[in-house]
Image (cartoon, rainbow, N blue to C red):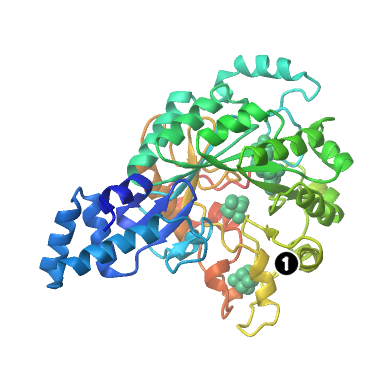
Amino acid sequence: MTACFSQSLIRQLRYRRDLGLLFDPKSGVFHRLRNTVAAEMVELMFSGADDAAVIEQIVARYHVDPARVAADATALVDTLTTPASAPIEGRVPLLDIDKRFDTKLDFPLRLEIELTAVCNWACGFCYNVWKIGPDMTDTEVRRAVKVLPEKHIPTELAMSIIDECAERGCFVMRYSGGETLLHPDAMEIFEHGGRAGMYQVVFTNGHFITAERAARLAAANVRCVLVSIHGDRDTHNRLTGHPRAYDKAIAAMRSLQDAGINVVAEMTLVKGNLNGVLDVVRDVYSLGVREFGVMRYVPTGRHDDRYGIPVSVTMPLVERIDEVLRTECPGMTVAWPCAQKLCTSDTDSPIRSDDPTLGLRLSQLAGHCESGMVWGSVSYDGRLRNCPHSNTYFGSLREQPITQAWPALTDVVHAAVTTRPSCAGCAVADACRGGCHLPAFFTSPVATSLGIPSVGPR
Ligand SMILES: C[S@@+](CC[C@H](N)C(=O)[O-])C[C@H]1O[C@@H](n2cnc3c(N)ncnc32)[C@H](O)[C@@H]1O
Ligand code: SF4
Ligand code: SF4
């Protein structure tokens, strides 16, 4: 029998009691315990019972042989704590866990913190409007951001949010910006998150990633970094307004991979780079990157004519990407993370369960984003909202904990995410939920009744 199975489990995994979920903060894998006895054993272990007490209580409840209980508990812990070489039933990859909750969560399962509003790039499509001069040297940029404390989340606030999350079972922390690494204490915040047992994900333009910083990120349990890349060198530099942006992003991907961090290349799809997607997939594949995200432009209300593209561009692109993956980039995964309508149609077009294109659609389109239901976002000034594209806030975390602010937010989102009459009968309505819910969210009667202003995307 493994010595101290209870201790092995508690050391390696985190437990979200209300949802019966176990989480491995090193691999980002969730385990959902479907077997009642296994769930009871885990509950006992996390309640402080030692091995003998776990065995004793299960024997008393089920009148079975103690040796058998000991062997089962040992096998259970071994299975849960062994890195996955093959899929195991109940073990759920990071993004898939989001799709399976039909009840309201008391507390989010993932949180995104916008560490800073400041950015050294000048992407015209970006929802975040605070830019500092792209002509500055890196030293000038670093000096400039230090005198803009009101544009960064206070370090103590970021750390107290992480502490509350660790306490309440929100184990996945994503950091964004602005340029995330321009928060003067970004590394200290990640290190705090690592110590608190968080699985951490960082969004970056890559500009300030060095080999040393990549190693420090890895040591702080930053397991995944999403690096923005919006085209070939010319297109990327033009869209970001920075002459070194492309080379910096590519160099960052190399350094991060060398440090053992999983790199996801993240492309924002706008009018000006629509034709370059396949080449970007090939380029990052040749660097060893195996995950690619396509974020179709979300309206900001500022330059929508210049950047916006219709939903209907999606399916032809999904087909061409699929061809490239099969013929040139084996092992690469492409996902469209920001809720894309699964029918990929500008007008709702319910899909039948025997639709021959369904498999292809589901191989790339991730389905509903679940923001405000499973995860939330904190702005650089400490306010809670459902996603970073929303400018509707549900209180300041400077004044109240997430525990208090979250219920009103998730109530409004749950009310906004209803099946539209035009989606009736759609076979994938549960996974799709009509795509992005922001338009309904802004006009939701519940939002109005709560006195939340009906405003469009920021
Ligand atoms: C706001 S940035 C922050 C992190 C970092 N500065 C970067 O460039 O990756 C996070 C991601 O959001 C994307 N993004 C910005 N504005 C967007 C919009 N209006 N629609 C969709 N994605 C957008 C960016 O391209 C980037 O990939
Ligand atoms: S639920 Fe609506 S938007 Fe989603 S695929 Fe079906 S018809 Fe299209
Ligand atoms: S609510 Fe809309 S904009 Fe926000 S993350 Fe979801 S799909 Fe994207």
**Tag 1 residue:** 346
Quarter of the rendering occupied by the N terminus:
bottom left
Q: Nearer the viewer, residue 285 or 391?
A: 285
Residue 103 spot, x, y in % from top left: 38, 63
Q: Residue furthest right?
A: 234
Image x and y of residue 299, in percent: 70, 49
**Residue occupying the point 75% across, 65% down:** 318
Q: Nearer the viewer, residue 308 or 33?
A: 33
Please say whether residue 349 is visible from this viewpoint: no
Count residues near mark 1 (Cα–Cα under 10 Å), then give few for <14, some for 14-19, many for 20+.
few
Q: Quadrant of residue 245?
A: top right
- Residue under the point 17% across and 61% down: 55
The quadrant of the picture showing ligand 2 is bottom right
In the image, is 65 to the left or to the right of 261? left
- Queried on whether the Cβ of the residue with tag 1 lies below 8 angstroms from ligand 2, the answer reads no
Taking 385 as reference, is 241 above or below it? above
Q: Which residue is most to the bottom? A: 354
In the image, 185: left or right of 296? left
In the image, is residue 67 above or below residue 213?
below
* Residue 62 seen from this side: yes
Q: Nearer the viewer, residue 447 or 32?
A: 32
**Amino acid of disc 1:** Asp
Task: Please state the horizontal and vertical placement of residue 419, each as a whole percent of the image.
Answer: 53, 70
Give percent across and percent down for residue 174: 53, 42
Image quadrant in which the C terminus is located? top right
Q: How many marks?
A: 1
Left or right: residue 446 compared with residue 456: left
**Which residue is at 70% across, 70% downward?**
347
Q: Residue at x 47, y 62 (%)?
A: 92
Dot 1: what SS? loop
